[in-house]
Image (cartoon, helix red, strand yellow):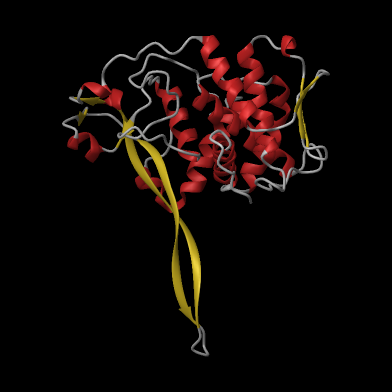
């Protein structure tokens, strides 16, 4: 996924990014499905990282996964031109940067004709250029050393199983379909042996637990009433990305669910109608992953 340079995207970052994602989806490529590769400087970590090791979040995860996939980067670490220089490195001549975005709000005070002042929050988004460490020479050893081998598959699955158990969600097994039942507030999963491997089971469960966070007592998202409506399509998009974020955190491989191919047309319709839809979905997917993480250490999860 080749993204517009920030200088040309400032006028409409939303439209520029969304158009690239739409182009990928029209080719059947889902940007959030990142191939796993342990051969990178940060070991088994699979989220894109800032220069100081802090993971990117939400939409920027999606953007940088897409860039890494398109350009063949294995290293997950990204930094600005200035940050590279401060570390003693230099971006190679001819290299092109990748877009990340920063969203925030500022408060504007307005005065009406009667002299009454009121404050109004105005959202904004800015684009920045970052470079992968594979585009930079002269960086110190922590950014260039070979990765350690990731933990054994059994250990990763055990970690994921413990993570899911700590959520406290009601998970039942049986039947042939995986789904979240909001009326009963439970996740239904097919028997474990019906999955091709343990990672596929865990990735599917991560998807359904993302749906589980939508309950009114948790993050209170609108699920939609039927296949094809916009809320339904948006929720499935959130769950796909939420699952990918969780799989990255847990060190397991996301599952490409063929039964979700039918959603592609719905996602395209949503994104073509609203250039901000993918940004909203990525933000809500990140919130879902964050919520599930808060359940791991005994702290009460934030309520919507």
Residue 211 located left or right of residue 145: right
Q: Between 110 and 54, which is closer to the camera in this rendering?
A: 54
Residue 284 image offset from top left, x and y in percent: 59, 43
Q: Is residue 105 above or below residue 138?
A: below
Residue 38 located left or right of residue 86: right
Q: Is residue 249 above or below residue 109?
A: above
Q: Is residue 247 above or below residue 274?
A: above
Q: Quadrant of residue 29?
A: top right
Task: Tell me if I can see residue 242 in this picture.
Answer: yes
Residue 19 image offset from top left, x and y in percent: 53, 40
Residue 78 located left or right of residue 231: left
Q: Residue at x 52, y 13 (%)?
A: 155
Task: Tell me if I can see residue 32 in this picture.
Answer: no
How many marks the image carries: the answer is 0
Q: Residue at x 22, y 40 (%)?
A: 82
Residue 72 image offset from top left, x and y in percent: 40, 19
Q: Between 98 and 178, which is closer to the camera in this rendering?
A: 178
Question: Outermost residue, front direction?
Answer: 298
Q: Is residue 197 above or below residue 87?
A: above
Q: Between 17 and 260, which is closer to the camera in this rendering?
A: 260
Q: Residue at x 61, y 24 (%)?
A: 28
Residue 298 image offset from top left, x and y in percent: 56, 37
Residue 86 located left or right of residue 235: left
Q: Quadrant of residue 240?
A: top right
């Amino acid at each position: 996924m080749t993204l517009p340079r920030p200088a040309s995207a400032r006028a409409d970052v939303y439209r520029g990014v969304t158009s690239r994602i739409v182009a990928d989806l029209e080719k059947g490529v889902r940007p959030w499905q990142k191939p796993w590769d342990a051969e990178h400087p940060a070991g088994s970590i699979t989220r894109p990282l800032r220069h100081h090791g802090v993971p990117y979040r939400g939409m920027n995860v999606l953007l940088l996964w897409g860039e890494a996939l398109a350009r063949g980067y294995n290293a997950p670490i990204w930094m600005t031109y200035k940050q590279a220089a401060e570390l003693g490195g230099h971006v190679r001549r001819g290299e092109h940067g990748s877009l990340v975005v920063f969203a925030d709000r500022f408060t504007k005070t307005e005065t009406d004709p009667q002299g009454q002042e009121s404050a109004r929050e105005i959202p904004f988004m800015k684009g920045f250029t970052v470079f992968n460490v594979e585009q930079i020479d002269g960086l110190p050893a922590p950014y260039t050393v070979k990765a350690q081998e990731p933990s054994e598959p059994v250990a990763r699955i055990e970690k994921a199983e413990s993570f899911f158990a700590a959520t406290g969600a009601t998970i039942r097994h049986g039947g042939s379909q995986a789904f979240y039942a909001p009326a009963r507030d439970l996740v239904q999963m097919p028997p474990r042996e019906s999955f091709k491997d343990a990672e596929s089971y865990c990735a599917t469960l991560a998807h359904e637990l993302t749906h589980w966070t939508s309950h009114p007592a948790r993050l209170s998202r609108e699920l939609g009433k039927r296949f094809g409506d916009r809320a339904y399509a948006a929720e499935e998009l959130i769950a796909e990305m939420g699952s990918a974020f969780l799989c990255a955190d847990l060190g397991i491989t996301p599952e490409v669910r063929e039964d979700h191919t039918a959603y592609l047309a719905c996602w395209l319709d949503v994104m073509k109608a609203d250039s901000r839809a993918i940004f909203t979905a990525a933000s809500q997917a990140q919130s879902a992953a964050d919520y599930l993480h808060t359940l791991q250490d005994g702290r009460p999860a934030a309520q919507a």
